[in-house]
Image (spheres, rainbow, N blue to C red):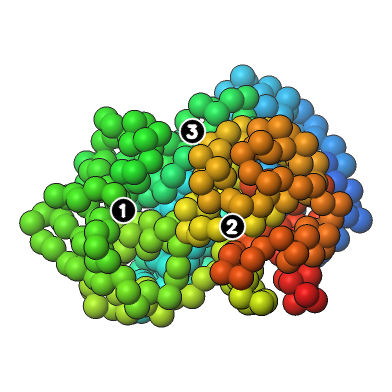
Amino acid sequence: MELKNKNILVVGLAKTGVACARFLASKGARVTVTDMRSESALKSQLAELEGYGIKLELGRHDETTFLASDLIVVSPGVPMDLPQLVAAKLAGREIISEIELAARFIDVPLAAITGTNGKTTTTTILGAIFKHNGYHTFVGGNIGDPLIEVAESHQIVDQVVAEISSFQLEWITSFRPTVAALLNLSEDHLDRYPNYQAYINAKLRIFENQTEEDFAVVNRDDPLVWQHVQGLKASLFPFSRKIELEEGIFCSDGVITYRHNGHEECFPTAAIRLQGVHNLENIMAATACALLLGCRPDETFETILCFEALHHRMEFVRDVNGVRYYEDSKATNVGSVEKALESFTDITLIAGGKDKGGSYAPLAPLVKERVRHLILIGEAAGRMAEELGELTDTRLAESLEDAVRLSAGLTAAGGTVLMSPACSSFDMFKDYEERAERFIAAVKAL
């Protein structure tokens, strides 16, 4: 891809936009960056671009600049219906995402992980497996470093593992992972997409450019996933915790079994530290990707045995008077909470936050069966109470701290208090990490 002397516009100056602008300038492109924020609000980002000769258009988006560009690179946070992007597309300008740009400069196998939930855990496990197998491995994308940093750095890389969001897939044209995994699908980001199907379609683009030589690692137990992956060009490689598979990876009677082209590997699950049914799925997906890309079974299983839970994903906080407290602040949608509820019984569930527009109805069977007390907080509390409140003992709390104190009074020894919100955090907190820290502090104060 020739970049020298091209007029290239980078839209959005978050971490991804900064990395793209630097890379493009280093390749001799005439780079302009545009962001609706002011120069003072972007002080740290602009400091990283000093000395690159990059033109700034801040506090506005000029349509004339979009139309005068040979190429436009869009950051994931920028919606596709931005009027200036719509005008540029109509005028025939090439518009791509950062992962599309990066992929054109990556010449080693790429494993890409998407899905509504579990992406970060699966990506991190897979990266750790590759490293334990002796590969020089880059892990990034939607977590850690942007994918473009593979192309920007001059380090030796044998394998690339990328967490990929639906936003990143919106402007791809030739992005082609050697192995692509779709972990699950549930309603999310309906504040960005016009409907659920549009969100699903964005996720499915991860498979769009794969060929028969590539693999699609998919969740056989998720009806929506299985329905939408029929007819892919890539070889389907399913994972399941419910069905024995002739080709794929599945778990039965405490053993994970991997079967591919008549070859079989078995791994007992008893000693795995990472708990929860959702993590069993994440482990199987990561194992499938690793073995399909040439990792050795023994080193792969060693990595899985040693892997601990990531922060804010069903993390055990402490035991108080025989009640175990778990923090699952990263569970910002219904699908994630479903997996958390499947992992426990006799639950006091603390949920709520900023409503993301989806239905809470899919939680109903598990709330009825497993949740003894439901404590709701935040903007979404009223709507959640309408949809789920009659299924169990339901209370409203003014704050997260109130919810923790209330849960301590309600939950009998042997029960579990689970903070798994099904909502984003922005109504009451800076982000999901602050929400997690406040929950942990409240539990430690009991």
Disc 2 marks which residue?
A: 347
- Residue 217: % across, % down: 32, 49
Furthest residue in direction front, as rendered: 412
Is residue 316 positioned above or below 384 on the image?
A: below
Q: Mark 2 to mark 1: distance in Å?
A: 23 Å
> What secondary structure is found at the residue carrying circle 2?
strand
Between 307 and 215, the one nearer to me in the picture: 307
Sequence-earlier tag: 3 or 2: 3
Q: CA distance from mark 3 to mark 1?
A: 23 Å
**Residue 210 x %, y %:** 32, 41
Whole-angstrom CA distance, mark 3 to mark 2, is 31 Å
Disc 2 marks a residue whose amino acid type is Ile
Q: Nearer the viewer, residue 94 or 310?
A: 310
Left or right, 166 with respect to 122, comes to right
Q: Earlier in the sequence, mark 2 or mark 1?
A: 1
Q: Counting other residues with Cα less than 10 Å from the Cα at mark 2, is it few (<14), some (14-19), or many (20 or more)? A: many
Q: Secondary structure at mark 1?
A: loop
As shown in the figure, which amino acid type bears the numbered disc 3? Answer: Ile
Residue 225 location (% of width, % of height): 38, 37
Q: Looking at the image, which residue is at 34% across and 43% down?
A: 221
Q: Position of residue 104 (x, y in %)?
A: 44, 49
Label number found at residue 201? none
Q: Quadrant of residue 260?
A: bottom left
Residue under pointer 3: 200
